[in-house]
Image (spheres, rainbow, N blue to C red):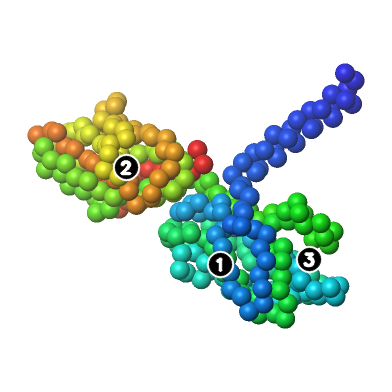
Amino acid sequence: MSRPLKTLALMVWVTLICTTVASANEVTLTLTDGPLTINKNQTVTKKIVGIPTGTPGSIDLKVKWHAMTLIPNVFEKLKIEVLHGTNVVVTSRCYSIHADKTPKCYLFPMTSSDTVEFTRTGEWKLRVTNESNNDVNGFNIQKEGTDLNPNVPGFVSTFEANCSLRDLGISGAPVDLPPHTSAERELFGPTYGAGAFLIRAKWHTDVITPNVFERLKVELLYNGSVVTTAYGYSIHSNEKDKLDLRYSSTGGDVFKWKLRITNDAGLKVNGFDVEKGGDLNPFVPAFKSTFEPCH
């Protein structure tokens, strides 16, 4: 192969890899039963398929439709509401994205800065009310193959997960444990989707003698069942086997994750946490336990 052809082949190969990586976490959204026909004075509610519950990300949602009239270039405005459960997230009275009028129905983006909304439960839906003078058809959040109107650009609506590392925390931290006791704490931070847990911890032995470290047993629970177990010492100890709990999850309800901490030793331990937090001990390094989505 000549040098120019080799160079071109390499450029194409690199482009394909970069394109794949850039779009790996992007999901094309669909509308149940789309495309829809919506008669005048009618309200229709349909589910948006593809937005995962509890996963922060960005939604790019746009809409098109056609007025059912023989008169050319008639564009009708619709009232469109984006619902998440019973919460109305967006309300817009707008025109199809191919109309020659504004505002057009570019309903988002909504980004991961709106984390509170993403963590709520409930289905994402569109509620559409036709307050116009004509019935409309071809209503959809993408251009499907049956829409032959050349004025409608090829488009899709999308959701892209935010795969940034998330910090974990536990309820009631820091935790004190008398000898031969266990405590369960809710674990905050994971998303509903797949991801990787990395849990480290710190704690102190409740004695005056310096450099006394006790090993703890830590279990990761989902919906009351143990999915993995680790034994180890505090992150600041001089022991070799420091606590290092790792687990790859395929996803689940964010409210069903817990940690069970067990002190099998004969001494009380205090200050257990999965981050340094407000621990003033200078020997405890700054650290976080994490959940990596999309992993």
**Three-letter residue code for mark 1:** Thr
Q: Which mark is residue 98?
A: 3
Q: Could you tell me if residue 111 is visible in this image?
A: no
Residue at 56% across, 63% down: 46
Residue at 44% across, 49% down: 191
First in sequence: mark 1 vs mark 3: 1
Between the residue at mark 1 and the residue at mark 2, the CA separation in whole angstroms equals 34 Å
Q: Which mark is residue 45?
A: 1
Q: Against 96, is 219 above or below?
A: above
User: In the picture, which quadrant includes the N terminus?
Assistant: top right
Contact check, label 3 and label 2, Cβ < 8 Å? no
Where residue 44 appears, x then y in whole percent? 58, 69
**Three-letter residue code for mark 2:** Tyr
Tell me which corner region of the image, top left, top right, bottom left or bottom right, holds residue 11: top right
Dot 2 corresponds to which residue?
Answer: 222
Contact check, label 1 and label 3, Cβ < 8 Å? no
Residue at 64% across, 58% down: 34
Q: Tag 1, which secondary structure?
A: strand
Q: Nearer the viewer, mark 3 or mark 2?
A: 3
Is 173 placed left or right of 112 in the picture? left
Q: Could you tell me if residue 266 is visible in this image?
A: yes
Q: Nearer the viewer, mark 1 or mark 2?
A: 1
